[in-house]
Image (cartoon, rainbow, N blue to C red):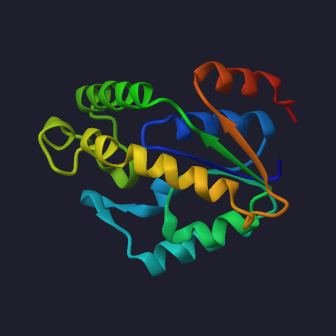
């Protein structure tokens, strides 16, 4: 595992898992959300985002988390391993709600200093909870198709379903 991409639905635990894996492997951790989001929840233009992804993924080793299809053609061919956190809808929805409650109550700054508000998280059409409800099943089917296609030669594909599998995987990773 020299260059690892972590994918999964929103709120599947990609960032937490990727940070832990990068720490165990003593590798650089890169969060695509950090590259994508600008202040006031503005999205970085695709050409700028792709240029940043191209730059950071040119390194010898890394663990990157994120699902941005606009950068998939850059990241996936460079990856040696893709790990899919394929959790149940119930777990992901639970995490979306609890994460939103936590973030709105703590006002913890996120990417580019953005802060989740109660209104944005629970009363907006841009709510992460609504996003999970609208995209979970479609993304799951898309990943299943992408990861079983013959378009990823030489890339180790690992699917982890449920927190027990995630924990067991991390427990078995050899620390560098």
**Is 4 left or right of 103, judged from the image as shown?**
right
Instruction: Answer yes or no: is residue 31 visible.
Output: no
Query: Quarter holding the C terminus?
Result: top right
Work out whether 27 lies above or below 145.
above
Q: Quadrant of residue 89?
A: top left
- Residue in view at x 55 percent, y 69 percent: 71
Q: Quadrant of residue 119?
A: top left
Q: Position of residue 98 (x, y in %)?
A: 33, 24
Q: Position of residue 24 (x, y in %)?
A: 77, 33
Query: Which one is nearer the viewer's eye here, 6 or 156?
Result: 156
Q: Quadrant of residue 73?
A: bottom right
Work out whether 52 lies above or below 36.
below
Q: Position of residue 141 (x, y in %)?
A: 50, 50
Query: Which one is nearer the viewer's eye here, 171 or 102?
Result: 171
Query: Which one is nearer the viewer's eye here, 97 or 87?
Result: 87
- Residue in view at x 52 percent, y 32 percent: 87
- Residue in view at x 19 percent, y 39 percent: 117
Query: Which one is nearer the viewer's eye here, 77 or 63?
Result: 77
Instruction: Answer yes or no: is residue 61 visible.
Output: yes
Q: Position of residue 134 (x, y in %)?
A: 29, 47
Image mark count:
0
- Residue in view at x 21 percent, y 51 percent: 126
**Is 141 left or right of 123, judged from the image as shown?**
right
Work out whether 146 lies above or below 26.
below
């Amino acid at each position: 595992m020299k260059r690892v991409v972590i994918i999964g639905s929103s709120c599947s635990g990609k960032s937490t898992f990727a940070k832990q894996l990068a720490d165990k492997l003593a590798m650089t951790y890169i969060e695509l959300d950090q590259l994508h989001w600008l202040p006031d929840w503005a999205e970085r233009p695709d050409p700028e985002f792709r240029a940043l992804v191209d730059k950071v993924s040119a390194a010898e080793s890394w663990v990157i988390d994120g699902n941005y299809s606009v950068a998939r053609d850059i990241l996936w061919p460079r990856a040696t391993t893709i790990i899919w956190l394929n959790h149940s809808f119930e777990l992901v929805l639970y995490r979306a709600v609890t994460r939103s409650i936590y973030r709105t109550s703590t006002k913890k700054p996120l990417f580019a200093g953005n802060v989740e508000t109660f209104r944005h998280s629970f009363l907006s059409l841009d709510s992460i909870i609504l996003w999970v409800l609208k995209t979970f099943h479609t993304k799951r089917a898309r990943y299943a198709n992408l990861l079983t296609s013959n378009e990823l030669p030489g890339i180790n594909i690992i699917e982890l379903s449920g927190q027990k599998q995630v924990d067991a995987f991390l427990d078995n990773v050899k620390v560098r």
